[in-house]
Amino acid sequence: MELTQVQQDALIELLNIGFGRAAASLSQLTGHRVLLEVPQVSVHPISDLSKSLQVIVSDQIASVHQIFSGPVAGDALLILDHTAAGMLKELLTDEPALPLKIDASGREVLTEVGNILLNACLGTFGNVLRVQVTFSVPQLNLETLNEVLQSLLINREGLRYALVVQAGFRVRDTELTGYLVIVLSVASLDRLIRSVEDWEQAQGRP
Amino acid sequence: MSVKVLLVDDSGLARRSTRRILESAGYSVVEAEDGLSALERYSIEKPDVVLLDLVMKGMYGLEVLEKLRQLDPGARVIVVTADVQTSSRDMVEAAGAAGFLCKPIEPAQILEMVERTTKKGVGWS
């Protein structure tokens, strides 16, 4: 399954808007400018998901996971390595990050930041495409990437392919980098592409 | 007597940072970390304004808003959420909230809305 160039361009434009909103929120929270990488969009068989994400993140990660449902449904993840998670806590609380473990205060910071960033991104998609998206309560996981991905697949027997959207970001003047990842089923991907095509058609009309 | 605000949010971080903003401006603050305790605290504390998160464990914020308005049709509720969707804002307005703010919040923005809601009373601001 592949996206046409036109679909890919429209999707990336939508992602730029959504991730831009998330970056603005992160910048407001940390007081630093946030630099965004161009979002990457790819379709993978579920079995290859782990392999494709292992290229960008280390195995030991802190992730915030939110399930979203509605006309377009899927999973959204904020992924950070443990060093970045500690830095984020330091930036937001002025408490030093402890080596080796993420404490209760760090967990709280990560969950709320994940909540704000994922909602900013997906909510912007909802606004642009005029669809209502409902969010689950954010869940913080301190597991390996593989364990996190396995948990996404529980009770999803029908999920064979996934659209993986990844956008790297870096908080300027720090070494804090992380990724936003969205995983969609093919059915949701079809609906998303139709909505994106409608949106693209409507651009520039009075 | 100072104006009392009930903060309802399942994030301790959000509660602490909002509490700091409100207390520095002279407001008195009480907290609840889920919908059920929010209803309980509302009945006991009778706050002047409620700041309510939407996505919480247990009862969803919209349901809490509806129950608060049944409990007290004069309840002044400002929704403070990470959900930036226009449709969510519309639903919240239709359910009788007095306002809608998106996280992360600016201190001036929240103080202005709480003050306006306190003065204006029930109704969208």
Image (cartoon, rainbow, N blue to C red):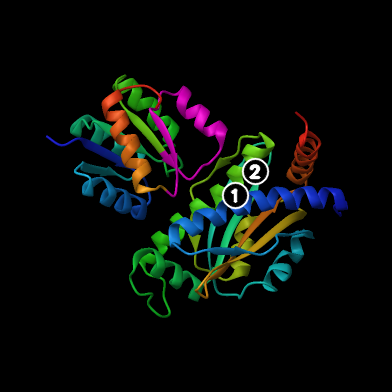
| Quadrant the C terminus of chain A occupies | top right
Amino acid at circle 2: Phe
Give residue A169's quadrant in the image.
bottom right
- Gap between marks 1 and 2 measured at Cα: 7 Å
Q: Looking at the image, which is closer to me, B119 or B60?
A: B119
- Disc 2: host chain: A
Q: Relative to A110, is B41 above or below? A: above
Asked if the stretch drawn in magenta spans residue A21, the answer is no
Q: Residue furthest bottom?
A: A99
Circle 1 residue: A121
Q: Secondary structure at mark 2?
A: helix
Amino acid at circle 1: Cys
Q: Residue furthest left?
A: B1
Q: Is residue A83 at all visible to an observer of this figure? A: yes
Q: Which residues are magenta?
A: B80-104
Q: Residue at x 30, y 42 (%)?
A: B7
Q: Residue at x 85, y 52 (%)?
A: A3
Asked if the stretch drawn in magenta spans residue B86, the answer is yes
Q: Relative to B41, is A49 above or below? A: below
Circle 2 residue: A125
Q: Is residue A158 at all visible to an observer of this figure? A: no
Have a look at marks 1 and 2 and say if they share a chain: yes
Q: Residue at x 34, y 68 (%)?
A: A94
Asked if the residue at tag 2 contacts the one at tag 1, i.e. Cβ–Cβ closer than 8 Å, the answer is: yes
| Quadrant the N terminus of chain A occupies | bottom right
- Residue A37 at x, y percent in the picture: 66, 64
- Residue B34 at x, y percent in the picture: 35, 42
Q: Is residue A87 left or right of residue B14?
A: right
- Residue A109 at x, y percent in the picture: 41, 61
Give residue B79's quadrant in the image.
top left
